[in-house]
Image (tube, rainbow, N blue to C red):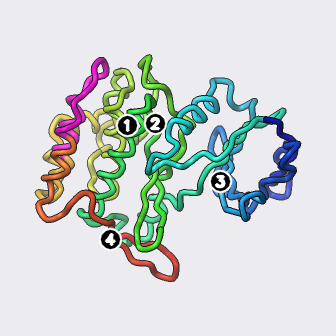
């Protein structure tokens, strides 16, 4: 495909130009919606599709010498038609930039979480979000990729009709599932298994997801006042049941199941789905997330 002219600006300065011969000035910038170490995200309108709003993820080639763009495009291609993931609409390169055009998936889970005075969701809603996140990650693993960056900014919330949709975004740090890799990651969302030197596998995406859900519950699972983060994680994984009240023990059960997963063979996930189906007797993990729409703002209890 031949590309030529797409102009984006950040703070009144030209960010990049690329021109597509047959679709001149196709995408018009609305505003910048986020940025990270390797890319900047913009809300754009597609002039060839009734000005539909999409997201353009733009990265300088000089900032990506490790193939992140190619990996993200490959993963998004595999995820076309799969729920809970952004749908890629276009991708192209210019002289200096790489661009991915995809669907807009809403606001971050962290932003929605911050609207609650206690900074937490009810147990039932956290349970539902956990199930959706685990299902989404399983679908990614099923097409041969690992996410490796699950955090409150990379999970999104969007209202569609009367339903709340949860999606996982940002595959900029993703990798193929095989060959396995040892990753020198040591942040709060990083699985304890990875921090002690194990190869990153499906287990570690799931564990990072449960760390996030613990935040949604307001559960203080890592006590770092008198010990390091890695020691706090070791303490948590040694006895997860000690960190949750009775109504949240489904979290401890899931952590125990995830911890039993190993990197060198395919794991039977039926115990995970059985746990979700039976954990809360009066709550189906597939039931709608409860929320209020207050002045066009999503508030999840």
Could you give the CA–CA distance between mark 1 and mark 3, rounded to whole angstroms?
25 Å
Q: Position of residue 183 (x, y in %)?
A: 45, 24
The quadrant the N terminus occupies is top right
The residue tagged with tag 2: helix, strand or loop? loop
The residue tagged with tag 4: helix, strand or loop? loop
- Whether residue 270 is in magenta: the answer is yes
Which residue is depicted at the point 41% across and 66% down? Answer: 164
Q: Earlier in the sequence, mark 3 or mark 2?
A: 3
- Whether residue 13 is in magenta: the answer is no
Circle 2 sits on which residue? Answer: 147
Circle 1 sits on which residue? Answer: 205
Query: Where does the magenta region start and end?
Result: 252-271
Q: Earlier in the sequence, mark 1 or mark 3?
A: 3
Which residue is depicted at the point 26% across and 23% down? Answer: 262
Question: In terms of image quadrants, where is residue 201?
Answer: top left
149 on left or right of 6:
left
For the residue pair 263 and 218, the one nearer the viewer reads as 263
For the residue pair 80 and 153, the one nearer the viewer reads as 80
Circle 3 sits on which residue? Answer: 55
> Crowding near pointer 4: few (<14 within 10 Å), some, many (20+)?
some
Q: Earlier in the sequence, mark 2 or mark 1?
A: 2
Q: Earlier in the sequence, mark 3 or mark 4?
A: 3
CB within 8 Å, label 4 to label 1: no
Circle 4 sits on which residue? Answer: 290
Q: Is residue 19 visible?
A: no
23 on left or right of 86:
right
């Amino acid at each position: 495909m031949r590309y030529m002219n797409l102009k984006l600006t950040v703070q009144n300065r030209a960010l990049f130009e690329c021109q597509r011969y047959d679709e001149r000035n196709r995408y018009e910038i609305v505003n910048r919606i986020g940025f990270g170490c390797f890319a900047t995200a913009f809300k754009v309108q597609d002039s060839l599709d009734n000005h539909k709003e999409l997201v353009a993820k733009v990265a300088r080639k000089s900032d990506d010498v490790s193939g992140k763009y190619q990996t993200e495009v490959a993963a998004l291609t595999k995820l076309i038609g799969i729920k809970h993931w952004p749908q890629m609409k276009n991708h192209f390169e210019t002289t200096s930039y790489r661009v991915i055009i995809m669907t807009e998936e809403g606001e971050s889970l962290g932003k929605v979480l911050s609207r609650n005075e206690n900074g937490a969701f009810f147990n039932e809603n956290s349970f539902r979000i956990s199930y959706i996140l685990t299902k989404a990650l399983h679908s990614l693993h099923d097409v041969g990729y690992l996410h490796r960056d699950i955090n409150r900014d990379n999970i999104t919330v969007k209202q569609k009709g009367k339903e709340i949709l949860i999606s996982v975004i940002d595959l900029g740090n993703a990798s193929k599932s095989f060959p396995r890799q040892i990753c020198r990651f040591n942040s709060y969302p990083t699985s304890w298994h990875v921090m002690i030197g194990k190869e990153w596998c499906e287990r570690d995406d799931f564990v990072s997801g449960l760390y996030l859900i613990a935040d949604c519950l307001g559960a203080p699972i890592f006590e770092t006042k008198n010990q390091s983060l890695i020691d706090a994680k070791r303490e948590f994984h040694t006895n997860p049941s000690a960190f949750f009240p009775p109504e949240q023990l489904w979290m401890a059960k899931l952590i125990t199941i995830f911890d039993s997963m190993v990197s060198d063979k395919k794991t039977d996930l039926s115990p995970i789905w059985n746990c979700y189906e039976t954990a809360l007797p009066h709550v189906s993990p597939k039931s709608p997330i409860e929320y209020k729409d207050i002045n066009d703002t999503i508030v999840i209890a």
